[in-house]
Amino acid sequence: MRSIAALSPGMMLLVITAPIVVDSAAAMGTERLNAKQVVAEAAVNDNSGIAGLVVIRPVRPHATKGVENSQPYQATIEILDSTGRLVTTVRTSSDGTFNIPLAPGEYLLRPQSGRPYPRASEQTVIVEPRSFKQVRITYDSGMR
């Protein structure tokens, strides 16, 4: 495990908590150990990741020409890697924006939805080295 002081300039420490089950039987010949959470340390290059805006629409029952019928939406977005493993969960700010540093690679954004509304579709995003991929997630409010 690296210490924060050992990180190179331009790097940041991302602490991820996730539920796990540790199988200690192979290592110790004893029973299975259940752990509620583990803190994982990961050095992430802060020059790449995903930046986005989440909106909800429609917000009015009738569309009016020239009047925006959407607004920023505070939502929770799960970010999974290309193998389907949960990397992190992001809560957008009240203005609907989010910014998450990630290593280059392919990610699946899975917006958490209501039942049945509001809802939004999953998106696959490819993060390139030294850039932030801009995304827009649109929730359907269910208003008709």
Image (cartoon, rainbow, N blue to C red):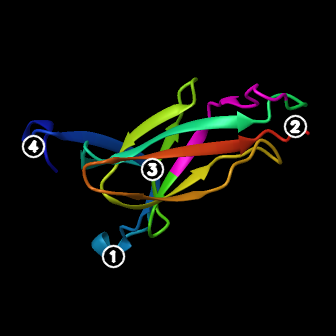
Q: Secondary structure at mark 3?
A: strand
Discs 1, 2 touching: Cβ within 8 Å:
no
Instruction: Name which of mark 4 and mark 3 comes first in the sequence.
Output: 4
Position of residue 138 measured from the top left corner of the image (x, y, whole percent): 66, 43
How far, Cα to Cα, is label 1 from label 2? 54 Å
Measure how far apart labels 1 and 4 are at the Cα level.
Answer: 36 Å
Mark in the foreground, 4 or 3: 4
Query: Horizontal placement of 140 versus 72: left or right?
Result: right
List x then y, in percent, for residue 42: 26, 49
Magenta span of residues: 64-78
Q: Secondary structure at mark 1?
A: helix
Could you say which quadrant of the image residue 61 lies in? top right
- Residue under label 4, please give it: 8
- Give the SS element for disc 2: loop
Q: What residue is shown with label 3?
A: 18
- Image position, residue 101 (x, y; %): 34, 43
Badge 1 is on which residue? 26
